[in-house]
Image (tube, rainbow, N blue to C red):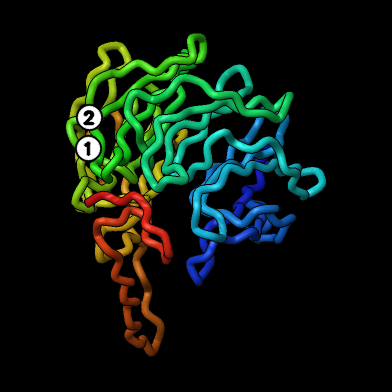
Amino acid sequence: MLPDGKVLVAGGSDSSGNASPTVELYDPVTGTWTDTGSLNTERTEHTATLLANGTVLVAGGTDSSFMPSATAELYDPASGGWTVTGDLNTARNLHTATLLPNGTVLVAGGADSSQSASASAELYDPASGTWTVTGNLNTARYGHTATLFSNGLVLAAGGYEVGGTSSVTTELYDSATGAWTLTGSLNTGRGGHTSTLLSNGATLIAGGFDSTGFTLASAELYDAESGAWTFTGSFNDARARHTAVLLPSGMVLAAGGSDFPTINTSAELYKGSTPSPTPTATPTVTPTATPKPTASPTPTATPRAIPRPRPTPHQRPTPP
């Protein structure tokens, strides 16, 4: 979300499965989408980070040749244009990007140009437009999550390791030392999950895929003081590649995602005080005078073991 309240959507895969350069803005006041300046490099599976100066940094991803990209560019909301900035030291996709309290951006992990999970991490300095290598992750991973704590530490959790095994490892990045330290392991290895920092300081990780591509309903809570993970209430509907948003009430809204072979259209709420996700209310449909049955769309079958299926001529790391 931009400072003016509009939402920027950049790149992604088009209807043919190819990386797209198109960019659009959503205006919540009018409820409409408007085209804005296109990316200099077509990309999908990248990251987008709002910087302190109001510009947006897009980094890495998969380019039009279906290979990890090292390019990065900045969006200026005032002009609607994109400007190329310094290249990453390591081309990567399926990584994470986290805005740190000092204004730099931490990019960690991902799949590199060898199609393998990467342990490398680097920092982007908006003042110089350059990337500097920082401490490596203890576990190479892609498809993981990164969560910024109020004390400035960053928690990297789960994802897929070299060979495609879903990871149980988690670790903390300290920007003061530039080093990663292992912390408690997840009870269930997972990738393609969500991570949400709750108002009480705990971190909720939910859903995702395991090593076999099975969609998970389980959820876990991380206690930053003890460094331990404990199970909490499971989803009503297993889901991966979904979204999770912390609401002003302190509850977490999880929506959509995949539960092979179904594209999940349900949504549910996690109540921190009562750790049990509950489905959101389904609106009552009032039939018209001459109701006609509507055929339900048949979900597209997707290989269960591939967390982000798309056409590609290159072998890329996926869980076995």
Name the residue located 22 percent from the left edge and 29 percent from the top edge: 186
Q: How crowded is mark 2: few (under 14 residues within 10 Å), some or many (20 or more)?
A: many
Residue 97 x, y percent position in the rendering: 51, 34
Between residues 66 and 43, which one lies in front from this camera angle? 66
Can residue 252 be spotted in the picture?
no
Q: From the viewer's perspective, is residue 147 above or below residue 70? A: above
Which sits in the foreground, 114 or 243? 114
Q: Callout 2: helix, strand or loop?
A: loop
Q: In this view, does 301 lie to the left or right of 52?
A: left
Quarter-of-image position of residue 83: top right
Q: In which quarter of the image is residue 102?
A: top right
Q: Is residue 157 above or below residue 165?
A: above
Q: Quadrant of residue 245?
A: top left
Amino acid found under the numbered disc labelled 2: Leu
Q: Where is residue 77 in the image (x, y as percent from the top left)?
A: 75, 44
Q: Name the residue under label 2.
A: 186
Secondary structure category for the residue under label 1: loop
- Residue 51: x and y in percent read 65, 31
Q: What residue type is labelled 1?
A: Gly
The answer to whether the residues at label 1 and label 2 have Cβ atoms under 8 Å apart is yes
Q: In this view, does 142 lie to the left or right of 301?
A: right
* Residue at the extreme right of the image, as rendered: 79
The residue closer to the viewer here, 7 or 288, is 7
Q: Which residue is drawn at 32% across and 63% down?
A: 263
Residue at image position (37%, 50%) is 242
Q: Judge the density around disc 1: few (<14), some (14-19), many (≥20) Cα neighbours within 10 Å.
A: many
Is residue 232 in sight in this rendering? yes
**Vertical comparison of 181 with 158: above or below:** above
Rounded to the nearest whole Å, what is the CA distance between mark 1 and mark 2? 6 Å
What residue did someone put label 1 on? Answer: 189
